[in-house]
Amino acid sequence: MKFEDTVSGIYINKNSYVRAGEQSLDSYYRPYHIVEYYRYIRFYADGTALLCTTTDEPSSVLPMLRRKEETSMVLRGHFRLFEDSVTIVATRLQKSVSEPRNRRRNKQTSVQEQVFQMELRLKSSGKRKNNQLQLVNYSYTINNKSTGRTTTNQIDVQSFKPFVFSRVKSFHIVSQAPL
């Protein structure tokens, strides 16, 4: 499978972690929750990439990963391929309105730009070539347009499993259709 063939499918990554629940009145019972979530990446031949992180199963998320769909869950970005390395940059604008402390002041609107940068490496498993993407580097930058403040954070990628390619027949029809 060539990387060009990946426009007819999606890369899926399933992760899980354990978090503590609410402590009960007696000290003998302490619940823990196993949280499972998915990350999805869809590539288009023109260099567009769609990213989504959610707890929803793939069957319910696939319809949202179309170009026409505009949802807050899906990030739209661009990717570059260099040898076996894929770099994705996606941007999200977030507006938040803060209530004034007294009635005389107007509401204040804060605009934040979030820029997500991912570097992934193509891997092969078994007889299938380039069917996995291993996360090598993942960072995000938050630019607060109102204050001019910028924050950059690096995410530890050691615990992330690789993204695995899954062919989607309906994507093949859409991706290979003439313009």
Image: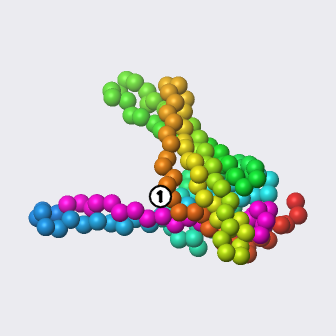
Q: Is residue 130 above or below residue 83?
A: below
Q: Residue furthest right?
A: 178
Q: Quadrant of the C terminus?
A: bottom right
Q: Residue at x 52, y 66 (%)?
A: 14
* Amino acid under disc 1: Ser
- The residue range painted magenta reads 1-23
For label 1, the residue is 159
Location of residue 114 (image quadrant): top right
78, 102: nearer the viewer = 78
Coordinates of residue 78 in the picture (x, y in percent): 71, 48
Left or right placement of residue 48 versus residue 23 in this view:
right
Q: Residue at x 61, y 55 (%)?
A: 51
Q: Residue at x 62, y 67 (%)?
A: 164
Coordinates of residue 110 in the picture (x, y in percent): 49, 33
Location of residue 125 (image quadrant): bottom right
Q: Secondary structure at mark 1?
A: loop
Q: Is residue 69 visible?
A: no
Q: Is residue 147 above or below residue 151?
A: above
Q: Is residue 99 magenta?
A: no
Q: Is residue 58 visible?
A: yes
Q: Quadrant of the N terminus?
A: bottom right
